[in-house]
Image (cartoon, rainbow, N blue to C red):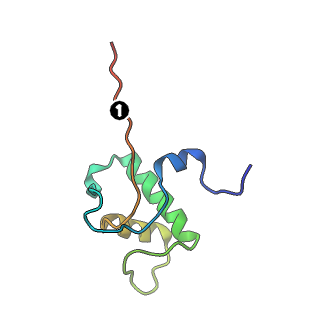
Amino acid sequence: MGGSLLSLADSEVLREIQLPQTASSAPRLSPGSYTRFERARILGARALQVSLGAPILVEIPAGEVDPVAIAEREFEALVLPITVRRGRASRAG
C-alpha cells in the first residue's frame, strides 16, 4: 500500500489540481448544479488538500483556520479547479 491519503476512487473524481489558464478555458458549473454527494466529495477532498498545505485560492479573514470553511468559501467563489465527470445514464430495456 502506498502512502497516498487519497484512494483510487478519489482519483476518479479529482483531476490534477492546477490553476486555470484562462477564465474561459472550461465551462464552470454553479454551486447549485452539483448533487449533494458531489458537493460533499468536492468539499471533503479540497478540505483535505488545504489541511495538507495546498495554496488557498480565495481571500480569507484573519484567523480563519478551518479547512472545511475555507473549502466552502472556495466552492462558493467558483475557483476550485476540480472537475466532476458524470457517467452516462444506462438505459434499461
Q: Is residue 31 above or below residue 69?
A: above
Residue of label 1? 88
Please state the horizontal and vertical placement of residue 27, each as a whole percent of the image.
26, 56
- Which of the two residues, 24 or 93, is positioned nearer the viewer here? 24
In what quadrant of the picture does the C terminus appear?
A: top left
Residue furthest top in the image:
93
Q: Residue at x 63, y 57 (%)?
A: 5
Q: Toward which corner of the image does residue 74 lie, by quadrant?
A: bottom left
- Which of the two residues, 72 or 12, is positioned nearer the viewer here? 12
Residue furthest right in the image:
1
Apparent side of residue 32 relative to residue 63 in the rendered image (left or right):
left
Q: Is residue 67 above or below residue 35?
A: below
Apparent side of residue 50 relative to residue 84 in the rendered image (left or right):
right
Q: Residue at x 52, y 72 (%)?
A: 54
In the structure shown, which secondary structural element does the residue marked by tag 1 occupy? loop
Please state the horizontal and vertical placement of residue 64, each as a whole percent of the image.
45, 80
Please state the horizontal and vertical placement of residue 46, each as a whole percent of the image.
47, 62
